[in-house]
Image: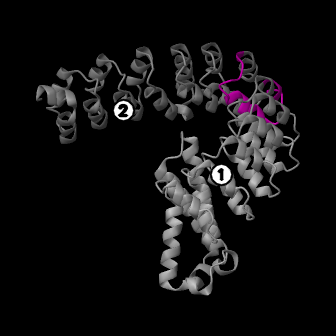
Amino acid sequence: MCETLKKNRDAAWVCMALGFLIGASALLLGGMDPILSSVSSFLVVGGIFNKFDIRDRLGIGKGSCNGKNNRAGESYWLKASDPTTPASDLEKLSHSKEKGIRISVALNPSTPPEVLEGLLQDEDGDVRLSVASNPNVPHEYLKMCAHDADRDVRLSVVANPNTPSDVLDEFARDADRDVRLSVVANPNTAPDTLETLARASDDDIRIAVLRNPNVPLSALREYALDDDVNVRQLVASNPKTPIDVLDELSRDAHHAVRAAVAKNAATPTRILEDLSHDDDMNVRQFIVLNPNTPDSALENVLDHYETKPWEREMKGFIALHPDAPPSVLRRLANDDDKDVRLSVALNPKSPPDILELLSKDGNSCVRRSVARNPNTPPHVLETLSRDEYEGVRLTVAMNPKARERRI
């Protein structure tokens, strides 16, 4: 078994990465679930067990490779990872000679604060790193870890979403670029700290500032004038961007920036109306996809598609729009393209009179889509139940309205 562990160190890194990813995802989704915590700890510690030679790094003698001792070690390891393990047992396991078991205790969300405090004094950096990654580690312990000599421990503190903003502010001045990047990515970082970091000449840091939910308005205004198209695009897509800035960006020379404004759910209808006349197809496409697009803007976009045959496939997007006005749907219901008519027939918001019109369509796929639509009137379904095509008749039978009336 020892030889097998030595031959699989590459897989160890995958285990550790998956463990940290599961743990971080659970935290971001609103708290560490006990099951996810156990899986996370299992993978992280499993990776560490494979990453290091157990005999040399964890102090387990050669005898531990025999079946009996190995099973006992695994039992302690799983017990140290289990969030239901009693606090008294976790306290005992925290003094284990085996590094992997101490790491499991350090990562366990049920480990008592006083036990975590003891593990902060551990001579091994991986154990201290695990304490800093614990979802329930007290703030004062995170502050203690902030001054750790081990760079990886400090990075774990910065990555922890529970780290206080004042600690993150201190790290914002760290000489290590990776540390500063982690500060920018942390949702607890204060707007003032982000504003300071926003003045950096580092493109990655500036972009990370724009992606932080606490990005200050001053940074959005400043970056709206940036020479980098990607930076302006991020400003244009941010829901916190002021309206006057969005208005300015809607006239940007680069189509990707204008498209980002068209996609932004916070963009006012007045600006969406103006962008519906844009020469770029991608900009108009996002106008169609924006849930706040006014009826008049959809009409404008449709006019563009009518005059440009190579963009006709985009009419299907309008036909499926949940808020497409009846006037637009009526135009599309008479379109020459059967796929456009089919999209209108599938739209659950299509008015009954339009669905009745499409129920007489010469294309059986369009009639079948009408038969599937929950908004189709019962008398139309009754007519379609006698359709010459079996597929249409079978689809009528599956419509809830048809079942209610036993059509």
Could you tell me which secondary element the residue under label 1 belongs to?
helix
Q: Residue 334 versus residue 111: which sits nearer the camera?
A: 111
Q: Residue 280 versus residue 36: which sits nearer the camera?
A: 36
Which region is colored magenta? 221-243
Q: Quadrant of the C terminus?
A: top left
- In this rendering, the answer to whether 174 lies above or below 199 is below
Question: Tag 1: residue type?
Answer: Ser
* Image coordinates for residue 345, horizontal then vertical, percent: 34, 28
Say how the picture is coloured: one colour
Mark nearer the N terminus (1 vs 2): 1
Q: How many marks?
A: 2
Could you tell me which secondary element the residue under label 2 belongs to?
helix
Cα–Cα gap, marks 1 and 2: 53 Å
Q: Quadrant of residue 278?
A: top right
Residue tagged 2 = 342
Residue 371 falls inside the magenta stretch: no
Residue tagged 1 = 133
Residue at 53 percent across and 28 percent down: it is 289
* Image coordinates for residue 122, horizontal then vertical, percent: 72, 61
Q: Residue 100 versus residue 5: which sits nearer the camera?
A: 100
- In this rendering, the answer to whether 76 lies above or below 407 is below
* Image coordinates for residue 201, horizontal then vertical, percent: 89, 40
**Can residue 344 be seen at all in this image of the molecule?**
yes
Residue 228 falls inside the magenta stretch: yes
